[in-house]
Image (cartoon, rainbow, N blue to C red):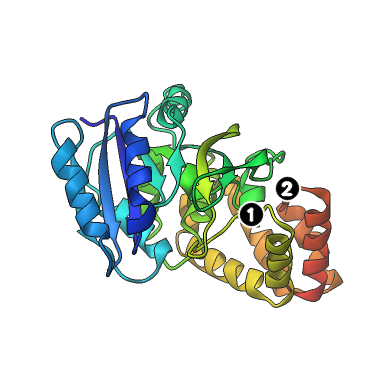
Amino acid sequence: MARTTILMATYNGERYLSDQLNSFLRQTSEDWDLWVSDDGSSDNTKNVLYDFSTKHDREHAVTVIDGPRRGFVCNFLSLASVCHNESEFFAFSDQDDIWENDKLERAIKWLETIPSTIPALYCSRTEIVDENARPTTPATYSPLMTVNPSFENALVQSIAGGNTMVFNAAAKKLIDDFGGAVPVPSHDWWLYLLVTGVNGKIYYDPCSSLMYRQHEKNVVGSNRTLGALLSRLNKFLDGRFKEYNDKNVYYLNNKISLISKENQQKFHSFVLARKNPGFRGLKPFKNSGAKRNGVLFNLALWLGVIIGRI
């Protein structure tokens, strides 16, 4: 039984893919295999994967499947659903990052402290690098999350990027339990919602576990720059954040009986706040406990309740 299965989603990733694959080979935790879902690449991505598989098939099994061609979120979630490996642990992977050598080891060391029957999720910060994998001077990292991991936080925010996430088989099963490749806004936010919803365990590592490459083809970029922060504010004001929540609420509500009773009550309060924009929504929003990382973002949430943008 493979100890860890890496779940990688690819799409026209030929340019940077080899750097990421080679970072897998440098892992201090060597017992892993790789499943890749390619979402219809028209470049040399599949040939890079097949070449890697041929060179390393004795040490690491590599499986390449065709993705659903419905975007990166469904590509990741469908891959997690169809992967039938009986591994203890699973790790999401982007195609263009570079993992720190001890990424899997650090994650597994914590995951092994959690009983296998309890859904558990490891995640971390990232180091921001340019398209040539050159760090900034001084080094730049994704914002530090100081909020405690919780369902209340997951209602309005993902705690970390999916590219940092390593989780156990019990957490992977939740993806299937809640409908598999549902068209939610983000696979990382969704998994965070599910694990916290059932009172699973979360560990947010304040140390970076990978180099997060920034380039013109990033589907989701760093939220560290002023431009990125303004872009997120614009999404809030123009209603896109509300649309994201619409999808999370809809698909979570479809299987609401699967989350804990306590979190069901918080969820229903959150839904009630969303249905009652203006000052009427403030009390149920308070009862939901929903909160983001940072004072200013929390003030924006309360404003969002009043103007109907959550």
Circle 1 residue: 157
What's the residue type where badge 1 is placed?
Gln
Q: Position of residue 178 (x, y in %)?
A: 41, 57
Residue 181 place in picture, x, y as percent = 36, 62
Number of numbered discs visible in the structure rendering = 2
The answer to whether the residues at label 1 and label 2 have Cβ atoms under 8 Å apart is yes
- Rendering coords of residue 99 (x, y %): 44, 38
Dot 2, how many residues are within 10 Å of its Cα: few (below 14), some (14-19), or many (20+)?
Answer: some
Residue carrying label 2: 293
Q: Is residue 205 left or right of residue 237?
A: left
Q: Quadrant of residue 244?
A: bottom right
Quarter holding the N terminus is top left
Q: Is residue 295 visible in this depiction of the protein?
A: yes
Q: To which quarter of the image does residue 44 belong?
A: bottom left
Q: Residue at x 74, y 65 (%)?
A: 230
Q: Residue at image x 41%, y 63%? A: 72
| Residue found at the far bottom of this picture | 238
Quadrant of the image occupied by residue 238? bottom right
The residue located at (18%, 48%) in the rendering is 51
Residue 233 screen position, x and y as percent: 73, 67
> Taking the image as drawn, is residue 310 in sight?
no
Question: Which quadrant, please, contains the C terminus?
Answer: bottom right
Vertical order, 86 against 227 (above or below) = above
Residue in the image at 27% along x and 27% along y: 31
Q: Nearer the viewer, residue 234 or 157?
A: 234
Q: Earlier in the sequence, mark 1 or mark 2?
A: 1
Give, as a three-letter code, the residue at label 2: Asn
Q: Secondary structure at mark 1?
A: loop
Determine whether, in the image, residue 10 is placed left or right of residue 66: right
